[in-house]
Image (cartoon, rainbow, N blue to C red):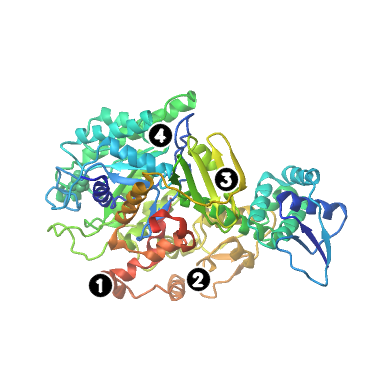
Amino acid sequence: MQLLDKLRILAAAAKYDVSCSSSGSTRKNTPGGLGNASYSGICHSWTSDGRCISLLKILFTNYCVYDCAYCVNRVSNDLPRALFTPEEVVALTINFYRRNYIEGLFLSSAVYKNPSYTMELLLKTVKKLREEENFNGYIHLKAIPGADFSLIEEAGKYADRMSVNVELPSSEGLKLLAPQKKHEAIIKPMSLLSSKITERKEEKKKYKQAPKFVPAGQSTQLIVGATPDSDLQIMKLTENLYGQFKLKRIYYSAYVPVSNHPHLPNISAPPLLREHRLYQADWLLRFYGFSAGELLDADNPNFATDLDPKTDWALRNLHLFPVEINRADYEMLLRVPGIGIKSAKRIVAARQVGPLNYSDLKKIGVVLKRAKYFITCRGRYYGATVVEPEHIRNKLLAGSKSYQPQYQQLSLFSLYPDIFAADEQLSRITGEL
Amino acid sequence: MLDYIYDGSFDGLLTAVYEAYYRKETPERIMSEQCYQENLLSTKLYVETDTVKANKVYQAIKNKISYGALKNVFYVFLSELPEAGTIIYHYLKLGWKIGNQVDKHLTDDRVLTVHDISRKVGRERHLMLGFIRFRQLEGNIYYAPMEPQYNIVGLVAGHFASRLADQNWIIHDVRRGIGAVYNRKEWIITNIDVKELKFSEEERNYQQLWKEYFNNIAIKHRFNPVLQKSNMPTKYWKHLVELT
Ligand code: SF4
């Protein structure tokens, strides 16, 4: 088979993995070597679905012995298959990198023969890149669940980032849709990687020379909408994964209908709005000091469709508002709808040299359309409404073009996926670095 | 009205700022001769570029204001906006008055304008780190044409010198006729005029592989060209291998 055909098949097979991030690594070029990492990551192109291309994202092979219902590569699916050689992956990576097409390689694989055999092939490839080609660009490597730990551990010496996909938010989901995958087989390598990463970080503090181990940390991905799990269950899992395993990122992938397995929902389009809400909430957890329990509870186990999670939270907690822009502390500013991290920081900086006027806030980047209901500026409230949830909710919704009464939105969503796919604000956030 | 006119170089601009200070004059505008448009009502002063004077101003920005301010000034200069000189002049005057806190005056228009332009230049630089595409030529030289809005070739060269350290490469700003040339040791900015390019044998092969990859990594259920274009403005598409 021609290299071009393999690339076509194995890129298409890898496209459902959302992560393409190349950030978080401090790897430097070596004398006579090729490449270095950019700590903040770099996007090289954007595909017609609006997602960033940063890494050459391919499967080593899509021959799979497993039969996960939600996956195109499942053994029972009839589709063209291909298998790279380590040399081919190395040549593609190096030549793409030299032309500045990519930041590096994201190598994953279906389970070929058995997990350890597959992991060995991946390991061989990255070892070649690092040791024979002196490649210092970014490498994200999948750890294949069920592979020998020693292989996974060795791979960690060469990769900048590693990931084990959680796949589904609950072990019941796994049982139903991926019977060959065991919950423990996923959790164990994650916890192994996590403890190794922490251990090496400690060593690095003592001896600068200690070799790298997955310096950009570990990430994971889970599929949303293939199982009946609620947003609350997902956010609880998210919180645990960030807390317990110190994950760098969790990616949410709206389930793309690829099969009509009886255990899978019958949908015509991926639930992009739900995916978007989960990313917004994930941000709130990581950077805004929120906990999952604040955003959702047993009575409200799913995110609202019409308002973002932060605004929704603020409306349920109106007793905390309005806050005075010139006095509120940074943590509280972050909780105001319409104020992001950048504008909160700017407010804090600008306040040091003089009090802020309402007209200054726009210059600083505050989205007044939303924020005005939740703030006062030099003691004055500009919301022109009664500070009550229903009033503010109506004002906010009247101001947003995309708002449709809920029943209509849901039916639109399933009937006309294109309308949603074309809405840029839905998945902007997933295209970040 | 008084206009200062400088030769378009960074040193020239800094010299103009120096002159204004020592002559105790307040020019209405500071403009490069390339952008200058005659105005019958104004008096003109042509500033002679003087590296010693320029260096004094350079040091005074760094030491009396901050390194961040120096970077802002340079980025605004590289924007090549006709009013860049005047904007920088007002920002610096404020900076010398209030010192290293100047960048916290986020609601002052003099500061805001500088930050805004500097951010745009920085953003284009960052985009270019991703969008630059090298083509392998005969003789194993890698050549990348680009047409950035701002004059940023000097801001991206260092990145590629450390990354593609073992390659000979050229980054060519086609519109300005200048480029960065690197010989596996050091890079310089120079005038460039390209006549004929001969691709290496494997170049077309890798271009085709890259296009194939590009077309197969998108998910058609998520088709969203609006988002694609907002992230990757079409004005940059011309030199992107995957889109030509
Ligand atoms: S093991 Fe991976 S590639 Fe194979 S069917 Fe399951 S999800 Fe797909």
Identify the mark at residue A415; answer none if there is no mark. 1
Q: Residue at x 24, y 32 (%)?
A: A120
Crowdedness near tag 3: few (<14), some (14–19) or many (≥20) residues, C-alpha within 10 Å: many
First in sequence: mark 2 vs mark 1 = 2
Q: Nearer the viewer, mark 1 or mark 4?
A: 4
Residue A82 showing in the rendered view? yes
Residue to which mark 3 is pinned? B180
Residue to which mark 4 is pinned? A135
Dot 2 falls on a residue whose secondary structure is loop
Residue to which mark 2 is pinned? A387
Q: Distance between the residues labelled 4 and 2?
A: 59 Å
Q: Measured from the top left, where is residue A225 in percent x and y?
A: 25, 58
Dot 1 falls on a residue whose secondary structure is helix
Q: Mark 1 lies on which chain?
A: A
Q: Distance between the residues labelled 2 and 1?
A: 37 Å
Q: Distance between the residues labelled 3 and 4?
A: 24 Å
Q: Distance between the residues labelled 1 and 4?
A: 48 Å
Q: Which chain carries label 4?
A: A
